């Protein structure tokens, strides 16, 4: 059975915002796209920029340092210089609290 970790209140992340949090050993970000929430690792795979400081455009997030673009839903790296995809997480919301599914390796 999947295990989830409470990360933040929905009200902390307004529409169009991205915020960084820590989940056990990994920094993660949560993005709110018009009331739909997405979670992925926040350290850019190119040179570890904090992607929560990036720019949202549609369902993508652009790295603030060198401009790599990632799909927030799938984590796919759409354009470089990064070449690796980002890990994304399942999440759920209960009583207004966003919870991220803990990957098997970290349970
Ligand atoms: S650190 Fe993100 S593209 Fe370089």
Image (cartoon, rainbow, N blue to C red):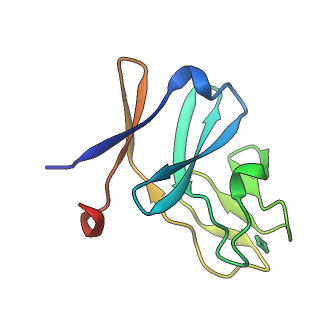
Residue 66 picture quarter: bottom right
Q: Give coordinates of residue 81: x percent, y percent.
A: 79, 80
Q: Is 40 placed left or right of 17 in the picture?
A: left
In this picture, is 48 found above or below 8?
below
Residue 69 picture quarter: bottom right
Query: At 54% from the left edge and 43% from the top edge, which residue is drawn?
Result: 38
Q: Is 106 placed left or right of 61 in the picture?
A: left
Q: Give coordinates of residue 57: x percent, y percent.
A: 79, 46
In this picture, is 18 found above or below 98?
below
Query: At 62% from the left edge and 29% from the top edge, which residue is drawn?
Result: 13
Q: Is 79 placed left or right of 103 in the picture?
A: right
Query: At 73% from the left edge and 53% from the top edge, which residue is drawn?
Result: 61
Q: Give coordinates of residue 62: x percent, y percent.
A: 78, 58
Q: State the residue in front, 89 or 12.
A: 12
Quadrant placement of the C terminus: bottom left
Q: Give coordinates of residue 47: x percent, y percent.
A: 73, 78
Q: State the residue in front, 73 or 88.
A: 88
Q: State the residue in front, 41 or 71.
A: 41
Query: At 54% from the left edge and 54% from the top edge, which residue is drawn?
Result: 28
Image quadrant of ligand 1? bottom right
């Amino acid at each position: 059975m999947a295990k989830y970790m409470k990360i933040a209140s929905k009200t902390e992340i307004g529409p169009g915002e991205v915020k960084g949090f820590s989940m056990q050993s990994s920094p993660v970000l949560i993005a709110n796209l018009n009331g739909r929430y997405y979670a992925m690792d926040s350290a850019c795979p190119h040179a570890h920029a904090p992607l929560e400081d990036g720019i949202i455009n549609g369902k993508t997030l652009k790295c603030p340092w060198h401009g790599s673009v990632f799909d927030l839903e799938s984590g796919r790296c759409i354009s470089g210089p990064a070449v690796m995809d980002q890990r994304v997480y399942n999440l759920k919301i209960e009583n207004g609290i966003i919870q991220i599914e803990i990957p098997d390796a970290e349970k």
